[in-house]
Image (spheres, rainbow, N blue to C red):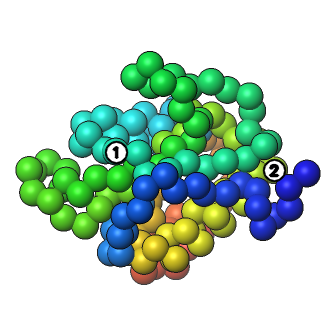
C-alpha cells in the first residue's frame, strides 16, 4: 500500500504558470453543490485539462467525457475572467466525480494545499453544501481569506 508521501498524488499533464491564481475545489458532498458548481465553471469557461489526482484507493470508476475515459478527479485551468472575454490570472478547478474514501480526505486536502503553495496560488476556495442538522457539539466553523476560523 502506498505511503502518505505518495498517495494521493497530483499528476500534471501540461505545464502552466499558476502564480497568483485561484483554486476552486468541488467534490460531491451534501447536495452535490461543489461538484455541480465546479462542473459549471469548467464547461462554461471552456477550461482545459491541467492534470488529475491519482490514488490506488479511489473507488473503481469509469468517467467518460467527450468519448474518452477520464480520471475521476481532474484539474482544469482557464485564463478567461468569468463573466468577461478578458484574460487574467488562471482560474484552476478541481472537479471530482467520486466521493473519495474517508481515510483519504486529509491526504487530499494536504496534497491540494501543498500544490497551491508550491504553484503560488493565492486563494483556495472549497465549495461545500451544508449538512442537515448540527453536529454533536452544536458548533459550526467557517473560514475566510485572511481571517481565522470562527466557532458559533
Residue at 66% across, 66% down:
110
Q: Quadrant of the C terminus?
A: bottom right
Q: Position of residue 103 (x, y in %)?
A: 81, 50
Number of other residues with Cα within 10 Å of mark 2, as a class: few under 14, some 14 to 19, many 20 or more: few
> Image quadrant of residue 29?
top right
Question: On screen, 62 above or below 99?
Answer: above
Q: Is residue 132 visible?
A: no
Residue at 34% across, 45% down:
48
Q: Image check: 8 left or right of 47?
A: right
Question: On screen, 112 above or below 55?
Answer: below
Q: Image check: 47 left or right of 109?
A: left
| Among numbered discs 2 and 1, the one appearing first in the sequence | 1
Q: Residue furthest left?
A: 85
Residue placed under numbered mark 2 in the picture: 103
| Residue placed most toward the observer, 66 or 37 | 66
What is the CA distance from the residue labelled 2 to the residue labelled 1?
A: 30 Å
* SS state under label 1: strand
Residue placed under numbered mark 1 in the picture: 48
Question: On screen, 80 above or below 30?
Answer: below
Residue at 66% across, 37% down:
99
Q: Position of residue 145 (x, y in %)?
A: 41, 74
Amino acid at each position: 500500500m502506498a505511503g502518505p508521501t505518495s498517495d494521493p498524488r497530483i499528476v500534471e499533464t501540461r505545464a502552466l504558470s499558476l502564480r497568483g491564481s485561484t483554486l476552486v475545489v468541488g467534490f460531491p458532498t451534501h447536495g452535490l453543490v461543489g461538484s455541480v458548481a465546479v462542473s459549471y465553471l469548467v464547461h462554461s469557461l471552456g477550461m482545459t485539462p491541467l492534470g488529475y489526482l491519482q490514488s490506488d484507493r479511489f473507488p473503481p470508476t469509469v468517467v467518460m467525457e467527450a468519448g474518452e475515459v477520464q480520471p475521476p478527479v481532474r484539474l482544469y485551468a482557464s485564463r478567461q475572467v468569468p463573466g468577461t472575454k478578458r484574460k487574467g490570472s488562471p482560474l484552476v478547478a478541481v472537479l471530482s466525480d467520486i466521493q473519495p474514501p474517508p481515510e483519504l480526505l486529509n491526504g487530499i486536502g494536504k496534497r491540494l494545499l501543498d500544490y497551491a503553495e508550491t504553484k503560488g496560488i493565492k486563494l483556495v476556495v472549497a465549495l461545500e453544501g451544508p449538512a442537515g442538522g448540527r453536529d454533536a457539539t452544536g458548533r459550526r466553523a467557517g473560514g475566510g481569506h485572511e481571517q481565522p476560523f470562527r466557532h458559533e
